Image (cartoon, rainbow, N blue to C red):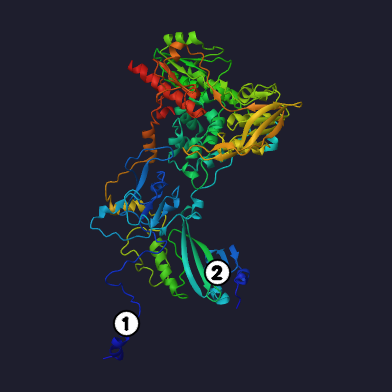
């Protein structure tokens, strides 16, 4: 078995961007159409037998979710990392639950936190941490944490607050200038 | 009955000697891990109350509050963070962005109480059991890399190039560089506490970051009518307390002020001072001296409707700051631009109008108030043998005579005695006139009153800086002068002052030079004050003592700038003038 995924990258027949390559570390970026083929090749041909993690970055400015699968070869602890971008709107990503049972758990969490669908994952709609959550998935960057906090919990106490900038201005007499310019004059 | 039902009790007993998996009872303490994010700690001595923790907190859990006896002091707002644990999500962003690293999280997480509102406190001020704990989450400087980007370096001329002329050393920021540098400001306002004139620094930095330079200039003039001068030679106390400077580099406030002023060919057009004349209030004020203090008072008084007359004994204004600071630091081109503002604002200047004893008495009768801002006119005397020899000169007079116009011979080998800005300016000017220059200073380099940047640039230009040299005497030789000095040891001052230099041994050393420039300070010349006034003034060490409103105690006479005690820098003089203007206006209002 080839231990390094270099060969499958060069043999793949589709475009792969190498993000970073190091001893025991290989990170690539690929089109989402080729994710399954690349990851299965890494498992079958390179001994990447463990799915260590699936992570998501909400790149809201580009309107995409960046999914990253981290695979590991337990024999030599080398990792192979695959990243791919998916549209944020109605985001649907293939499940790897049939290949690695742990993916069922990872994907369930990502569904709860980002609202990403993993068709074929039998447990993705079960609560993971947020029991009875009805809001926008909270890790999405368009979720307004502060607004939710105020709406849900209200003002627990009267908030005593002093703005440092104003406090300094008042106590140093900064704004008491001899030329009282109005804002419209400035 | 199953087989396991029979053996299970025995299997359970087999674990009797092993560590229990369940929570022990009676309950034992279960501390958090070493890097656990628990309740906050705050080192109040390190905290500067910048409010960055409050700003980053996504849940409004942190509020800046006044603590007992809190007052803003230089570089400290006096406020401290209070944390509400009904809102805190323990993310520790407040710790990551803390400007000074004073805030940390302990590994304590347990606080049983039946009062939810009790779960809030001011870390460091309200004593807690975990205050002295060393464990928990502290700032990681590797994370701070994103919390503070580096300062945008000011482009300067190379040392080999700049010693060839008196051209300005600093090249200036581009708009992109200025925006990047101004954008680093976190808007805490601590700089305002250090600025003698309390300028609106965060606001004008934001205006520059947004590309609104005219707004920035208008904000300058709220508290400083000489921003271009300050943008080049300010002592920038503001930068010394910048929150960004604790774990990174302070915002280049001085250079950004310079940038915004340089952007415009005319500052008076930006301000439109002549388009909005103020209603004259019928009051007249006389100002003696056109240095920063005099000009500042004149500008603000005129803007408040006073008829302001400024008397200057020389043919040009600007005072010592404009005359003695060399062109490579403060080009004279900016002077006319600044004076244009004063003229258009309506300030009346009287040049070659030296004010003598009789004049002062007449002026004090004719005007509603007099502001004395005559500055320091004399170079202090030095008392070692040989200071009267030909070739020994006062550095202050050398600079006042504009060495950059080429009319003064500096000599081939020059020695400058002193460690202030006058000493450095003289040395660098002589270097530009082609001399080999040595600076002899009694104390250590870190004790030099000169600006650190000036010292560094002087060394870059090849000036031989010799600290811990005690001057003994100056002798005349066939080829010029011999400067005799002894090496110094520094002795700690038991009173807590600067270490004092004492002679290390009896050995004398000599340096052969053509000229020696003495730069050991300036003193005032109060001979223009008649006895009727000076007898009633409180004068100590040649300086007129004033109260917090620049009032001398003699009716209608105010004083400011270098002629009064103070830092002796441009911005302090400007602040003096502004305070005097306010006080004169208030005095006239209540009369």
Give the residue at the far front of this rendering. Answer: B506
Disc 1 and disc 2 on one polypeptide chain: no
Chain ID of residue with mark 2: A
The mark found on residue B421 in the picture is none
Whether residue B389 is visible here, answered yes or no, is yes
Please tell me which residue is depicted at 32% across the width and 62% down the height of the picture.
A133
Please tell me which residue is depicted at 49% across the width and 54% down the height of the picture.
B141
Whether residue B203 is visible here, answered yes or no, is no
Tell me the SS state at disc 1.
loop
Give the residue at the far left of this rendering. Answer: B114
* Side of A117 relative to B461 (left or right): left
* Residue B71 at x, y percent in the picture: 36, 38
**Marks 1/2: CA distance?**
45 Å
Crowding at dot 2, Cα within 10 Å, few <14 / some 14-19 / many 20+, comes out as: many
* Side of A26 relative to B87 (left or right): right
Residue beneath disc 2: A80
* Side of B239 relative to B332 (left or right): left
Crowding at dot 1, Cα within 10 Å, few <14 / some 14-19 / many 20+, comes out as: few
- Is the residue B458 above or below the residue B535 in the image? below
Q: Quadrant of residue B583?
A: top left
Which one is in front, B275 or B474? B474
In this rendering, the label closer to the viewer, 1 or 2: 1
Please tell me which residue is depicted at 42% across the width and 55% down the height of the picture.
A141
- Is the residue B452 above or below the residue A14 in the image? above
The quarter of the image holding the C terminus of chain B is top left
Residue beneath disc 1: B16
* Residue B375 at x, y percent in the picture: 52, 21
The quarter of the image holding the N terminus of chain B is bottom left
Which one is in front, B374 or B58? B374
Circles 1 and 2: CB atoms closer than 8 Å: no
Chain ID of residue with mark 1: B
* Residue B291 at x, y percent in the picture: 52, 22
């Amino acid at each position: 078995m080839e231990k390094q995924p270099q060969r499958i990258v060069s043999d793949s027949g589709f475009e792969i961007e190498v993000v970073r390559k190091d001893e025991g570390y290989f990170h690539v970026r690929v089109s989402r159409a080729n994710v399954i083929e690349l990851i299965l090749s890494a498992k079958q041909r390179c001994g990447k037998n463990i799915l260590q993690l699936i992570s998501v970055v909400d790149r809201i400015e580009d309107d995409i979710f960046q999914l990253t699968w981290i695979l590991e070869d337990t024999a030599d602890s080398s990792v192979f990392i695959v990243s791919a971008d998916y549209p944020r709107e109605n985001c649907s990503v293939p499940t790897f639950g049939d290949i690695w049972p742990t993916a069922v758990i990872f994907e369930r969490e990502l569904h709860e936190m980002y609202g990403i669908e993993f068709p074929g994952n039998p447990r993705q709609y079960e609560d993971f941490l947020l029991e009875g959550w009805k809001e926008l998935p909270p890790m999405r960057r368009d979720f307004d944490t502060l607004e939710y906090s105020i709406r849900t919990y209200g003002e627990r106490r009267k908030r005593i607050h002093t703005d440092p900038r104003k406090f300094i201005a008042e106590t140093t007499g900064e704004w008491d200038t001899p030329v009282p310019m109005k804002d419209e004059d400035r | 009955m199953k087989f396991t039902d029979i053996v299970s009790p025995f299997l359970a007993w087999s674990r009797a000697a092993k560590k229990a998996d369940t929570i022990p009872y009676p309950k034992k303490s279960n501390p958090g891990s070493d890097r656990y994010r628990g309740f906050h700690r705050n080192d109040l001595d390190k905290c500067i109350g910048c409010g960055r923790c409050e700003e980053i907190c996504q849940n409004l859990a942190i509020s800046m509050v006044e603590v007992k006896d809190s007052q803003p002091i230089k570089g400290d707002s006096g406020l401290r963070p209070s944390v509400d644990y009904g809102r805190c999500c323990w993310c520790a962003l407040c710790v990551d962005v803390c400007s000074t690293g004073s805030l940390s999280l302990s590994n304590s997480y347990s606080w049983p109480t039946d009062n939810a509102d009790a779960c809030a406190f001011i870390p460091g001020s309200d004593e807690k059991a975990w205050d002295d704990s060393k464990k928990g989450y502290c700032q990681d400087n590797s994370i701070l890399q994103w919390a503070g980007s580096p300062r945008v370096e000011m482009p300067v001329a190379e040392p080999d190039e700049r010693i060839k002329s008196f051209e300005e050393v600093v090249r200036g920021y581009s708009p992109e560089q200025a925006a990047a540098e101004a954008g680093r400001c976190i808007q805490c306002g601590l700089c305002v506490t250090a600025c003698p004139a309390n300028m609106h620094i965060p606001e004008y930095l934001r205006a520059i970051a947004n590309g609104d330079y005219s707004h920035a200039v208008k904000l300058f003039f709220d508290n400083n009518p000489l921003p271009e001068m300050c943008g080049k030679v300010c002592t920038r106390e503001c930068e010394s307390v910048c929150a960004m400077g604790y774990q990174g580099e302070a915002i280049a406030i001085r250079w950004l002020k310079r940038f915004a002023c340089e952007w415009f060919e005319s500052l008076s057009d930006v301000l439109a001072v002549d388009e909005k004349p103020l209603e004259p209030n019928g009051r007249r004020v006389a100002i003696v001296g056109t240095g920063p203090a005099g000009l500042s008072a004149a500008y603000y008084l005129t803007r408040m409707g006073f008829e302001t007359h400024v008397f200057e004994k020389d043919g040009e204004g600007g005072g010592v700051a404009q005359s003695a600071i060399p062109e490579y630091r403060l080009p004279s081109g900016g002077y006319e631009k600044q004076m244009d503002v004063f003229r258009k604002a309506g300030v009346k200047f009287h040049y070659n109008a030296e004010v003598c004893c009789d004049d002062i008495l007449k002026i004090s009768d004719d005007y509603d108030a007099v502001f004395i801002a005559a500055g320091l006119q004399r170079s202090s005397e030095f008392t070692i043998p040989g200071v009267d020899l030909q070739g020994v000169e006062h550095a202050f007079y050398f600079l006042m005579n504009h060495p950059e116009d080429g009319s003064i011979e500096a000599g081939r080998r020059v020695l400058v005695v002193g460690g202030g800005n006058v000493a450095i300016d003289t040395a660098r000017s002589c270097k530009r006139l082609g001399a080999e220059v040595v600076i002899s200073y009694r104390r250590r380099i870190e004790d030099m009153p000169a600006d650190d940047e000036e010292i560094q640039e002087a060394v870059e230009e090849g000036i031989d800086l010799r600290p811990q040299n005690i001057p003994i005497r100056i002798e005349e030789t066939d080829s010029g002068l011999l400067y005799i000095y002894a090496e110094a040891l520094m002795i700690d001052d038991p009173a807590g002052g600067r270490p004092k230099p004492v002679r290390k041994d009896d050995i004398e050393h000599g340096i052969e030079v053509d000229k020696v420039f003495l730069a050991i300070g300036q003193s005032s010349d109060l001979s223009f004050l008649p006895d009727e006034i000076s007898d009633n003034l409180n004068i100590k060490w040649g300086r007129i003592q004033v109260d917090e409103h620049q009032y001398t105690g003699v009716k209608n006479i105010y004083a400011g700038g270098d002629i009064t005690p103070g830092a002796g820098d441009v911005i302090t003089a400007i602040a003096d003038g502004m305070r005097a203007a306010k006080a004169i206006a208030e005095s006239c209002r209540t009369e």
